[in-house]
Image (spheres, rainbow, N blue to C red):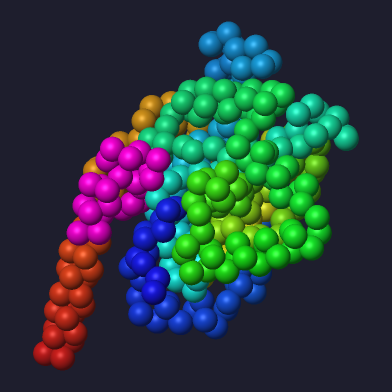
Amino acid sequence: MMVRRRYDGMQADVPTFRNVEPHVMKTRNESVGLFNTQFDLTKTLPFIEEYNQKNNLDRKQRLTFFQVFLCAMTRTFLYHPHLNRFILGRRYWQRNRLNFSFVVKKQLKTYAKETFAKMDFDPLSTIEDVRQLYHNYINKSRSSKGNETEAEIDFFGSLPRWVLMIAMKVVKFLDFFNILPPKMMIEPDPMYVSATLANLGSVGIQGQVIHHIFEWGNSSWFICVNKIHKQVVATEEGEIKVIDVVDVGINLDERISEGMYYMNGLKTMKKFIENPELMLEKPEVTQDQIDDMMLNDPRDKKNYKKRQKYLEKRQKEKKKERERKAKERLKAEKNA
């Protein structure tokens, strides 16, 4: 019997018809939505330059566009919490943490060793919070000690082929039925995240690259941030000008929500990326908005159970309220 909670999430309350989708579209790769978008960096790049100069940040500690992008992602997921959902075991889950993963090269060389960074973010983070968090974590990942993610990958990568094949099947089975050991697998694994990102611009890749999504793990997003480049555009006044832009390729599991919700999420992302000054201060949100994300870090042993009970009670109350309003609408339509 499957329980309504996992180490990394809580079963989401979705409309009845949506429960059929994971049985019709069983895998992420047959449920993908592909999207290419472009952001105008006319205000963003000068902001980054001014920020670094004002705060006397050197090359090793400077604010970068990728950090601005990460901060914009945290704001997007805050205002659109359904984007932090995933499907596993053919059920919908709301992730209880906000985390992103991406590849980090130990050195910026062709054959330099690579490792995955898996970072947790506070949805109320400012640009400065993200900048500090990023540099602290990346410095650790590039050190000789590495991180938990690197240790897990090295362990499985060292297994004989036949052992690895069996191990992968066992892990998938345990994960499907929600009995996967969390600390051994979910915690360090970079594929168990809100979104996986590829900072292609850091290695000079320009274009409209869209990466495949992974069946392993439970990430519902893969986002490629391509190289910033110049582009000729026509203004609404009919003038021709050259501006700095970045192409972003998005691959997502479209089962987790619906088209209009995604579009609103992308509009929010665009607003913050093109106007980064909006992220200098913490977002002004209500406690209800924060609770809609259903965040509850299982590593916080002191408060986890208490908050879990609160979130489950809140979810039941919201469901009852939604059903009551639905009945009232049906009654009003009959009497009309």
Residue 149: give x, y in percent of width and height. 63, 40
In this image, 223 relative to 220: left or right? Answer: right
Is 21 placed above or below 37 here? Answer: below
Q: Residue 26's quadrant in the figure? A: bottom right
Residue 5: give x, y in percent of width and height. 37, 61
Name the residue: 20% across, 75% down. Answer: 323
Q: Residue 245's quadrant in the figure? A: top right
Q: Locate the C terminus by quadrant.
A: bottom left
Q: Locate the N terminus by quadrant.
A: bottom left
Q: Nearer the viewer, residue 84 or 53?
A: 84
Q: Residue furthest left?
A: 335
Residue 190: give x, y in percent of width and height. 61, 47
Name the residue: 24% across, 43% down. Answer: 287
Residue 107: give x, y in percent of width and height. 79, 27
In this image, 251 relative to 85: left or right? Answer: right
Q: Nearer the viewer, residue 166 or 95?
A: 166
Q: Tell me the magenta residue range.
A: 292-313
Residue 331 shows in this picture = yes
In this image, 166 relative to 65: left or right? Answer: right
Q: Nearer the viewer, residue 81 or 143?
A: 143
Q: Is residue 320 within the magenta segment? A: no
Residue 248 shows in this picture = no
**How many marks can you see?**
0
Name the residue: 78% across, 47% down. Answer: 158
Is 262 placed above or below 225 here? Answer: below
